[in-house]
Amino acid sequence: QHGVKRVRQSEQHLEAKRLREQSKIKEYLDLTQDILARKKRADWSMDAFALTTKLLHINPEFYTVWNYRRNICLKGRFPGSSPHAINDILSGELSMTMAALKTHPKVYWIWNHRRWCLENVPDRPGSDSEDISDPLAWRKINWDKELLVVERMLDADPRNFHAWNYRRYILANMAVPRPQTAELSYTTQKIESSFSNFSAWHQRSKILTSLWKDGVLNSGASKEGEFDLVRNAMYTDPSDQSAWMYHRWLVGSGGDKAQLEREIAAILELMQLEPDSKWCLESIVHYKQLLLKNHTSGDRNILINECATLLEGLQVIDPQRHRRYEALG
């Protein structure tokens, strides 16, 4: 670190450190060998289960051990257990993986194990003392709680794509579906807190596609609001690609000539403020080429020349991609 004087370590200190590291490596290798041997002989005992806990705490990316742990549950712990006991076991697994996610939020195998836990929550048995028993009660509780968990994860790291993918999985499988309009509001919140959150824009595009398809929202009317939102993002940070990608998704194949011309004009206005903006120039080229492709008119040669000039400008502004811009011409 800057400003901190380096202290030369003695040979004895370095040797002690080396021996400690060697001891840890040997312990890890011995533990791994023990667990794999137990797996091979189909050991479904609690001792084996405890060893997987120890090893996964050291190396949460050891997917073979996660698979073995699940088999211990399925073949050793679940058989003969009551639904209450199985639900408690799975709750313990969710707690264990939650602790792991705090230090390893992007390890796929931890998220995968949580999926397995949720998918194996048993039906809640009825009781003579209860007038009404909801067999889905435990599933509702666990899936609702999981949505809150993933929201906390996204509060900590709004761009964690593992968490966003997992959120889509949770929403698609909840016992009581969450209204898609509520999820649209959630993406609004995330986008307004950070226009560069590409995952939130992506989630928004998926939700809107579904809402338009189901007729919940009028695509024409709601798209105007989306253009306002994304233009605000483009003006706020013209160098961030997230908003530009979403804008292209909104424009689509460019079948609406009036819309294309309006968006080109809006970007040209922004370019007056940001003349060296790569995304301004590239987007104008893209949309003018859509005009050429979809809407023939007497202005074709003018549009072709304008695109060529813009692409030449891009080669100057962004020389690393000059071959790409030559190919677009």
Image: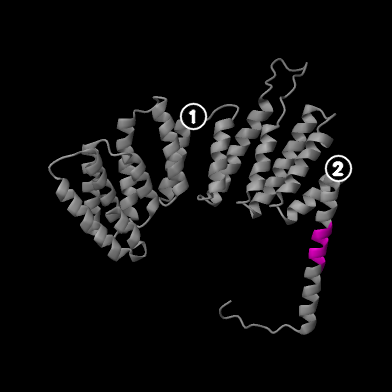
The secondary structure that most of the magenta stretch takes on is helix
Q: Amino acid at mark 2?
A: Met
Q: Which residues are magenta?
A: 23-30
- Residue kind at label 1, given as amino acid type: Pro
Q: Measuring 72% from the left and 28% from the top, which residue is drawn there?
A: 122
Q: Any mark on residue 104, and which?
A: none
Asked whether 99 falls inside the magenta stretch, the response is no
**207 with respect to 282 (left or right):** right
Magenta span includes 24: yes
Q: Between residues 162 and 132, which one lies in front from this camera angle?
A: 162
Q: CA distance from mark 1 to mark 2?
A: 42 Å
How crowded is the residue under tag 1: few (<14 C-alpha within 10 Å), some, or many (20+)?
Answer: few
Asked if 261 appears above or below 131 in the picture, the reply is below
In the rendered view, tell whether residue 234 sits above or below residue 5.
Answer: above
Image quarter (top left, top right, bottom left or bottom right) of the C terminus: bottom left
Q: Is residue 229 left or right of residue 166?
A: left
In contact (CB < 8 Å): disc 1 and disc 2 = no
Residue 128 placement (x, y as % from top left): 78, 16
Could you tell me which residue is drawn at 79 percent across and 49 percent down?
52
Question: Of label 1 and label 2, which has the lower sequence position?
Answer: 2
Report the number of numbered marks. Answer: 2
Given this view, does label 1 or label 2 mark the residue nearer the observer? 2
Residue 275 shows up from this direction? no
Q: Position of residue 111 (x, y in %)?
A: 64, 44
Q: Residue at x 67, y 21 (%)?
A: 134
Q: Which residue is mark 2?
A: 46
Q: Residue at x 75, y 32 (%)?
A: 87
Residue 214 lies, in percent from the top left, at 42, 25
For residue 26, above or below residue 69: below
**Residue 179 got which mark?**
1
Label 1's element?
loop
Front-most of residues 301 and 188: 301
